[in-house]
Image: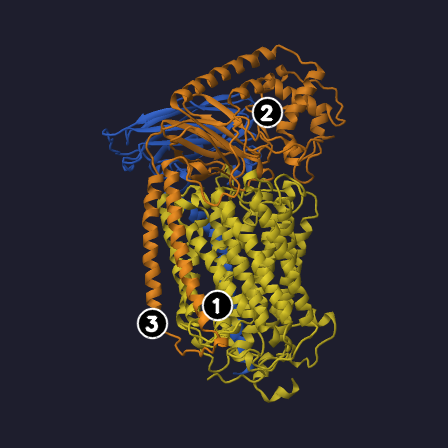
Amino acid sequence: MSEQSTQSKNSKMVIKLLVIVVGMFGFGFALVPLYDVLCDALGINGKTSNTAALYESVEIDESRLVTVDFITRTNTGMPWEFRAETRQVKVHPGQLNQVDFYVKNTAVTDIVGQAVPSVSPGPAALYMNKTECFCFEQQKLHAGEEMLMPMKFYVDPQLPENITYFTVQYTLYNVTATADVVAMN
Amino acid sequence: MTTATDSTHIDDHHDDDHHDHHIPPGIKRWLYTTNHKDIGTLYLWFAFIMFLTGGAMAMVIRAELFQPGLQIVDPNFFNQMTTVHGLIMVFGAVMPAFTGLANWLVPMMIGAPDMALPRMNNWSFWILPFAFAILLASLFMEGGGPAFGWTFYAPLSTTYSNDGTALFVFAVHIMGASSIMGAINVIVTIFNMRAPGMTWMKMPLFVWTWLITAFLLIAVMPVLAGAVTMVLTDKFFGTSFFDAAGGGDPVMFQHIFWFFGHPEVYIMILPAFGIISAIVPTFARKRLFGYASMVYATASIALLSFIVWAHHMFTTGMPVAAELFFMFATMLISVPTGVKVFNWVATMWRGSMTFEVPMLFAIAFIVLFTIGGLSGLMLAIVPVDFQYHDTYFVVAHFHYVLVTGAIFSIMAAVYYWLPKWTGKMFHIGLAKWHFWCSLVSVNVLFFPMHFVGLAGMPRRIPDYALQFADFNKWISIGGFAFGLSQLIFLALLIKACKKQGEPVSDQVWEGAEGLEWEIPSPAPYHSFETPPVVK
Amino acid sequence: MLTALMTAPVFAETSDKIEQYQLNMTRGVTDISAGVYDMHMLMFIICVVIGAGVFIAMFISMYFHRKSRGAKPANFHESVKVEIAWTVIPFIILIFMAVPAMNLLIDMEDASEPDVSILVTGSQWKWHYKYMDNDVEYYSKMATQAEQISGKLPKNNNYLLEVDRPLVIPTGQKVRFLITSDDVIHSWWVPDFGFKQDANPGFINDAWTKVNEPGVYRGQCAELCGKDHGFMPIVVIAKEPAEYDKWISEQQAIQEQAKAEEQRLLAMNMTMDEAMDMGEKIYNANCAACHMPNGEGLPGVFPALKGSQIAIADQPKHIDILLNGVTGTAMQAYAKQLTMSEIAAVVTYERNAWGNDTGDLVQAKDINSAINGQ
């Protein structure tokens, strides 16, 4: 073994290992989109898709009825009134439904809100297809303004037989402070 | 050193301290050192100081929990104590101690003169004290140190933490960088510096387990760095990785953290397996049973450790299919772990055993680690974990595998190799006192934790309901006794560093085998100027 | 006074004896928790047997194969057969553990329609319960006095495990809990029900129970959630369905009465002394955990109110913060936790205590107009 060869062998190996290190650092960040993909695929955490579904040639399964509950919450620092006009609907899978949500900004300032959906039991989230939802984008209400926000959805007929009942929760967050930043993205 | 010029090998390390023929005096020796033994000593002393520091925090925790009610500290400080205790013990005590042992032993065991990258070795040690200085300093700042548990779950560590979190993040980054450098050094040394004839399947198991550990380190420490970076940007720069309002998810933090965290658990135990696999054969005077299966078992534990992370998260609301997958994968890990324990027992079987202090610690390790491993198997069972999770049962489990596992193995290693390092036998009387006091007190400390956990005491609480009072008193008494027992160890180590004691032979222990026992005691400053020939 | 009215009928102080030295997991009061207990015991026994086997083999060799007894080391160090045996046998044992565990887990996941649905929301450091079918909702806070914690008063039997308003559920019916959080992650755990479930901010998890026996069941938050994580108990009272129905209609009546009372109080003005008196009580019960009884907060963690610009100058902002909380901090919204007159009293107290001598006297009607955005 000559001096040169061990030195260069060592440096080559260090470089290779550093590539792994950098790669794994990147992998840590890659877990973020990867996690979202897995959530979409497996229904982890009851996340629903945040893009609109298409309602095309969906067969309606008249043989069963699914109960869908709606829960509305406002998080800390969100002075809005927020409620579902219909608290519970019974639907046939495949049938397109609309539920309206009432919001009122009771504050003296304009506020931007973001609704975050969550479905329980989690696996049902995969079959909750929304063709239109206020949760897809931020909502801005002027001081004292009120609004009726529609949400259209259908339950995928593929819904497993054992799920006859699920709950959809919307939590409204006050995102006024960061709204501009997000709007730019 | 000058006598070694007949070796061509010396030239491999031309620009390092090898041509510096005398050791610089005083503090400079330690600051500038690139010698694997000096750096190993620095790591070990640093780890021991951190062990005492983290231990002092555990004493605060146990003093507060001695009886119900808030007596000594307020809940916010209590949370800082549990958090920093965990961080210091994991990143400041166990990991640097293993790195110190690797520095001392790997070159000697594979017949190399030093580590492959001595400069980086110096760096990787000397950034550590800064990391812990930053972490400890944060305790004294306004708002105090990190108070969100060593697992720093978001959003408690992001939105709801104080500004000291920035210091925590910075400290963890430095610790991570240090570990990664240490790991790279170990890998390069083992790949490129083995003596002729030291083939892969002839390497001592300590070298094998450290090689696998080093790969785990470079695979997961960057993920931890990513996680703390996300915490930092979420808290200070308006990202929302873990904030539902911005489209993030707090549960994702736990996935990323435990993707690091579970392999980390094995980072802290695999080198221990290597140590026990060295000590048991020596004092049983019989070759290690199933060397090859030990190597394969270690490798399969390491691989499996990447697919079990979510068993820390069964109560977060995962789909049943995922829970079942992680349960099965976790249970599977007990198979190679069991193989290791069985192999050690088979090594003892029909041996010719003596019970010197290293062997005492090794036997205690096998028994108590097995208890910790079996409670780990119980924790893997999802439906029952719904009850065990986040109780003192979990605290009991991981202290059995980390204190009576990792820490006992480090103590066993120190007693085993210390005579080789100093050339003198340590004070056997003190060592026996240290062992027996530690063994009794550690069980008084951790065993009743199983009971209070099963009875329903959550972890990380500064005060508890009255039905847990009696056991907690015992746990605290055991804790104080275990803490005091370590002062015996301190006294023994000071004596050893002053080179007091009987001189020892090169082999030190009858029955010890391996390259490190072939060089003189104390081990010369440079181990193998001429590469030994491995038969 | 209103709080007292609502609290009194449900405040349960049971005098069951404290069981010291409980060694094992509770069997619980549901079929699931009994299944969990049986699974735990099965695992425990298997682990003890395996452990005993290993330790006996070790101690036999430590005793008989000692050098001091003249033992000569044998020469074997490898056996593929043995290695295969102790890989395969544990694997088979694992299957015997995994199958019942899997069945139990599948039993625990029951998506059928519940009889009662309750939304459980954790926040720092209290629980909020909302009966989804009955418009009944309230907060449940620890009721143990600070004096007991600091040792000034003797600790009673349910020290740290008592709340002002327990959750009430019917026996023999399927009760579904939808669990979420307002701030950090909490975990809802009653050992007698055999499960714990994390409360994740922004997301809901569900769990269910069917309690067989009426009784009082106690638990705690199980996930580190900040400073007072150890002081966030859960008390559940299971009542016979008929009694439960009676209780829930009582609660509805009380809540309606409370709303009417609130409207009536709008017209009334408190004197400064009344407001300060009431305000101090409410402050100590709700605010002192973070802002400290002396109003100085915890520097760097929770802001001081003493001398704060908001508490001595900006009154509308002060009221807004109390009503709606502050996004991204531990400061919660109190609009639903306290009545308007209570909020008025606490604002008055904060603006006049600890040397914040503004002299401001806030009335319920001021709070009302703030709520309505005027």
Residue C80 is labelled as 3
- Residue C324, image quadrant: top right
Q: Secondary structure at mark 1?
A: helix
Residue at image coords 57%, 86%? B8
Q: Is residue B495 visible?
A: yes
Pinpoint residue C164: horizontal percent, then vertical percent. 55, 26
Q: CA distance from mark 2 to mark 3?
A: 72 Å
Residue located beneath label 1 in the image: B209
Residue at image coords 56%, 53%? B444
The yellow-tinted chain is B
Pinpoint residue C151: horizontal percent, then vertical percent. 66, 36
Instruction: Please name the amino acid that badge 2 sits on.
Output: Leu
Quadrant into which the N terminus of chain B falls = bottom right
Q: Chain of mark 1?
A: B
Mark 1 vs mark 3: same chain?
no
Residue most extreme to the left = A63
Residue C323 is labelled as 2
